[in-house]
Amino acid sequence: MMKIYQTQDKRLTRTAEIDEGAWVCLTAPTAEEIRQVAATLDIEPADLQAALDPEESARVSLEDGYTVIIVDIPIQVPDKGVGVYTTIPLGILLTQQTLTTVCSVDTQVLQDFAACRMREFSTRKKMRFVYQILNRAAMLYQQELRLIDRRRQEIEKNLSGVSMRDSDLIELHALESTLVYFATSLRANSTVLDRLTRYKRLEQYPDDMELLDDVIVEMRQAIEMTSIYRDDIKGTRELFSAVLDNRLNNAMKYLTSVTLIMAVPTVVSGLYGMNVNLTGMPFAANTWGFGIVCTIILCICVGAAWFLHKKHML
């Protein structure tokens, strides 16, 4: 899908033609749309298609007459629950007259600009617009990171429950995988920002440089948050393992204690069950012998249970 926007009289309007100062927004574009934009702006079709490759790495390249900027942005994985994300490339192509964005999905980063939810941006101020897009992407990373940490805290609360669900462990692993993707993408984005500060070909204004510094700060903060939350999830996973081991140890201790108590009547009944002369068996000739033996067994079992309870083994 191709949409063309242009700022006129400080208002964002949608147009039908690619004019000077236009923003060409390509979302999962068709081959025909790519050929049309490439021919109109004199851009290589391969550079437009690069952002559609999910394995494309973040980079900045200066081509003949235009600049290609590719960064990674977060996107939620469908049907995987809250806090499970991956990253996809977002391509930004700058020419002398226009700015073109290319993405395989309708991302929230660009939706906020198209819906005019972002203030003080203009399609005519191309570099400032680029930095505003990157700043929104960094803020979106931070927003998703907070959701991930909130979900981790909810999973951690389940440890206090009687039963621990396998789904919690699986979801915790998914959250940790998300942070791995975020960490890799944020480091690549940070490298892109560092290169943008050194490129002299791109026209830079003092206000733009200040905004770029803000973007770098936000990106570094997102990297630090990712590192902290990864350590938190690692600690939660270790806590899960410790709780599971403790519960297993308690269960084994309880079963061992029960086995010791049940061994008493088993041994006594085994002795009385042997095929020997009854003369030597205590209480064998007594009319109440069976009841006496059962009472003795019960007393021994109760005594053993009391002793194990005092030793915190039952």
Image (cartoon, grey):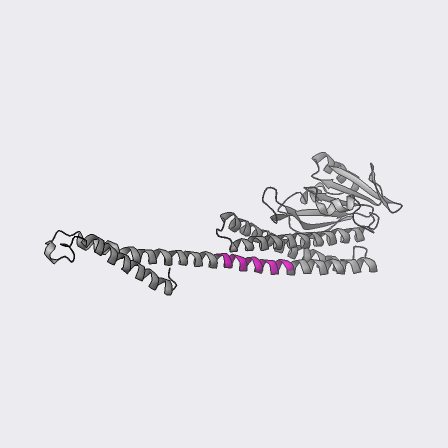
Q: Nearer the viewer, residue 55 or 211?
A: 211
Instruction: Left or right? Give the position of 87 relative to 36.
Output: left
Residue extending furthest top?
32
Q: Nearer the viewer, residue 224 or 235?
A: 235
Q: How far from the left and from the top, in percent, is residue 26? A: 73, 40
Which secondary structure class fits the magenta region best? helix
Residue at screen point 10% across, 56% down: 279
Residue at screen point 78% across, 43% down: 115
Image quarter (top left, top right, bottom left or bottom right) of the N terminus: top right
Residue extending furthest bottom?
311
Instruction: Left or right? Give the position of 83 relative to 267.
Output: right
Residue 11 part of the magenta-drawn span? no
Q: How far from the left and from the top, in percent, is residue 288? A: 19, 53
Q: How far from the left and from the top, in percent, is residue 156? A: 55, 55
- The quarter holding residue 179 reads bottom right
Q: How far from the left and from the top, in percent, is residue 145? A: 64, 54
Please tell me how many numbered marks the rendered image carries. 0
Residue extending furthest right?
9
Image quarter (top left, top right, bottom left or bottom right) of the C terminus: bottom left
Q: Nearer the viewer, residue 266 or 106?
A: 266
Q: Is residue 15 above or below residue 112?
A: above
Q: Which residues are magenta?
A: 225-240
Q: Nearer the viewer, residue 313 or 278?
A: 278
- The quarter holding residue 188 reads bottom right
Residue extending furthest front?
287
Residue 232 part of the magenta-drawn span? yes
